[in-house]
Image (cartoon, helix red, strand yellow):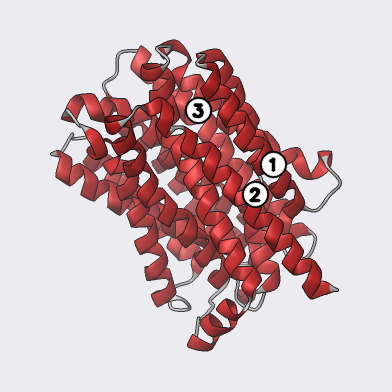
Amino acid sequence: MKAKYVYTYCVCAAFFVCAMLYAMQGALITSYINHYDLHSAAQGATGSALSVGQAIALIILFWQAGKIAKPIILAIALAGIVVILFSISIMPPFVLLVLLTCMLGIMFGSIGSTSSSIIADLHDGDDSPKYMSRLHGVFGLAGLITPLFFRGLFTAGFYWNVSVRVTALVVVMIFVTYVILSRRSLKSITLAESGRQKITRSDFAAFFRRGSNILLIFCALFYGAHQSVIVVWIIRYVEVALETPLLAALSLSLFWAGVTISRLFMHRILPVSPIKVVLFGNLVSAIAMCVGILSGSGIVVICMAFVTGFSSGTTIPALLSACCAENDCNTLLPTNFINLALYSSLIVCPIIVGALEAYTSLNEAMYLAALFSLLCGILVYFYCRKTRKMSA
């Protein structure tokens, strides 16, 4: 039993790396724009490339399902991230940077989907939402730390490529820790728990016959779009559009602080089902984003960033838990489709926001975060109605 929990935290450590890479895009976007002299939609190219790689990773996971054990996938992906980060740190031409970021996304996506699947395998019943929230709480924790980490490096006079190199060294330490601890703990975990699951055509057909699965996928799509606008653009929005550079990194950190607190403690604070928290949380999130943007104040925006993160932070773990509970015969299938929807929105949104900034202003483009959160909340409402009728 102890080995199972040791490996759970090994998976959380690998997932921590994903969040670092994700938050790193927002921390570096201004550096990329200045160094490569980017304009219009090109400003969001690296953010979209990361998401393209994540989507490719899910296709690869569908293809190799059952061929490679999930713990080995995590180890390979962590090693790949180290190599790619060191390659990015040499400041390659922009086209190569985008390609490397796409490859980084493949490693990211492999860890993201596989980690959620492993948690669903290891912890069933009432433990599943709790440990899924802890896993994604780690994601929020890394998202909180990373912008401040990069801000500290920039303040100390390090150029962006040196900051990436330092990040690579952090990943090296996590990789070594993962390999050592997971090798010991996996000896005591059965094959069913460490998991090889094959996916057949009948699995696909059964999955899409359930209308509730489709609703959950679209919920993930819109929440991913909402989160993408904030994570990739809020630092630049506060720094450039609101002309408060000292608060820029804090805006993203407070967003992730809200997400982290929400994922770790929301299930204890509110004695209601996680999916209902998602419903009301996304509606509150939409209102908070509108209030922040309408204020035109950097201080109000960073406060509303925290409210947004806190109110909607449980969305992805709740969607994953709900989808895995309805499709518990093969947890890789629902986790892959939820993550595929999430990554698909992340592909498009950075480019859309970059284009809108060029043709209107970043202030107007940021309203997309509120719109997408509202749409997510509406779809969750229809999901709750549908599942209530099915259980009646």
Direction left: furthest residue: 93
Position of residue 16 in the picture relative to residue 362 (left or right):
right
Q: Is residue 55 above or below residue 97?
A: below
Give the residue drawn at x 24%, y 28%. Answer: 33
Position of residue 56 in the picture relative to residue 191 (left or right):
left
Q: Position of residue 150 (x, y in %)?
A: 40, 24
Direction bottom: furthest residue: 202
Mark 3 residue element: helix
Label 1 crowd bin: few (<14), some (14–19), many (20+), radius 10 Å:
many
Mark 2 and mark 1 residues within 8 Å of each other at the beta carbon = yes
* Disc 3 target residue: 252
Q: How many marks?
A: 3
Q: Position of residue 370 (x, y in %)?
A: 55, 37
Give the residue drawn at x 55%, y 63%. Answer: 217
- Residue 1 figure quarter: bottom right
Could you tell me the amino acid type at mark 2? Gly
* Disc 2 target residue: 377
Which comes before the other along the chain, label 2 or label 1?
Answer: 1
Q: Nearer the viewer, mark 2 or mark 1?
A: 2
Label 3 crowd bin: few (<14), some (14–19), many (20+), radius 10 Å:
many
Give the residue drawn at x 65%, y 52%. Answer: 378
Look at the image and tell me whether residue 190 can be seen: no
Mark 2 residue element: helix
Q: Position of residue 333 (x, y in %)?
A: 54, 72
Position of residue 253 in the picture relative to residue 86 (left or right):
right
* Disc 1 target residue: 281
Q: Nearer the viewer, mark 3 or mark 1?
A: 1
Mark 3–mark 1 Cα distance, whole angstroms, equals: 18 Å
Position of residue 149 in the picture relative to residue 49 (left or right):
right
Mark 1 residue element: helix
- 337 or 125, which is in the foreground? 337
Could you tell me the amino acid type at mark 1? Gly
